[in-house]
Image (cartoon, helix red, strand yellow):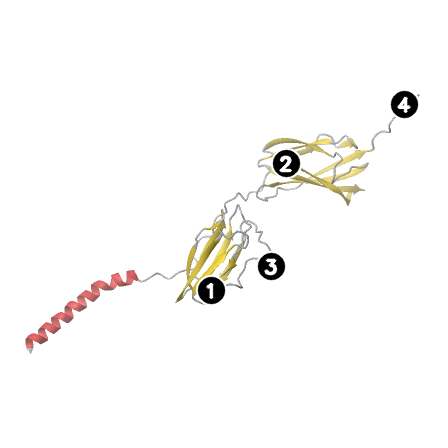
Amino acid sequence: MVRRRTLTRARRAVAAVAAAALAPALLAARPALAADAKVGIGHYRWSQPVVHVDLGQRVTWYWVGPDTEHSVTGISANDAADDSDPGRLPDHRVGSSFALTFSRPGVYQFQCKLHPVVRGEVIVSATPGDPADDPDPIPRPNVDLARPTLSNVFLSRATFRTGAGATLNLALDDPSLIDAEIWHVSHGHRTTYAGWQTWHAHIGFNYLPFGLRGPHFQPKAGRYVAFVRATDLFSNVSATHRMRFRVLAAPPRRRGHR
């Protein structure tokens, strides 16, 4: 009886030591709690095709470009009502975002309504999560968000006759579309809209034909003001430059002698 009791006590001691040794390993093997997630959408894909979160946590999608005509649209039964662009086609600006909070466990599948290859899924565990746990950084844009610098903007002459026009001089640090919004001026103030002109410009100095008759601007004698700006390939817009100019009537044609 004593021997058996001694053996039993010894076995219990060994078991206790083994359990103590295994405890750290078991704790380390426990899955870590998920956290709020951030996903970048660009280059026709999700930055994380499969996203894991816990119950009650949030996923935020960011459009990082350069392609931004993508939606986050639910295609499974449990997320059919979720859509970043309900009732419209997607067309987002770089840096815009859309977020969903998941209150039920399960697998949620999403894809773009225009480009089905832009897709992914969110797997929500049954473990309650911490809504304040938000460690992921915001995805960085894939495009340059700096505004183009438009400088040295002036006309070769501020007064010209109809049909003659002038040369618009300007300098750029980024290839851009140049647009000039033109208004009539009366008594020193802008009055009515007169039209607009556009040009494609390159890096460096540009010399563009200005004030000629075209489909969107038909100059007549009078005073005008033009607001000139540059828009680059990523829709970044420069500061606006203002130019005043005057158009004179064309001289009358001389009749030939018979």
| Cα separation between marks 4 and 2 | 42 Å
| Badge 2 amino acid | His
Residue 214 image offset from top left, x and y in percent: 74, 37
Above or below residue 186? Residue 78 is: below
- Residue at image point 21% right, 66% down: 19
* Residue at mark 3: 87
| Badge 1 amino acid | Phe
* Residue at mark 1: 102
| Badge 4 amino acid | Gly
Cβ atoms under marks 1 and 3 closer than 8 Å: no
At mark 2, the secondary structure is strand
| Cα separation between marks 4 and 1 | 85 Å
| Cα separation between marks 1 and 2 | 47 Å
* Residue at mark 4: 256
Cβ atoms under marks 3 and 4 closer than 8 Å: no
**Mark 1 vs mark 3: which is more N-terminal?**
3
| Cα separation between marks 3 and 4 | 67 Å
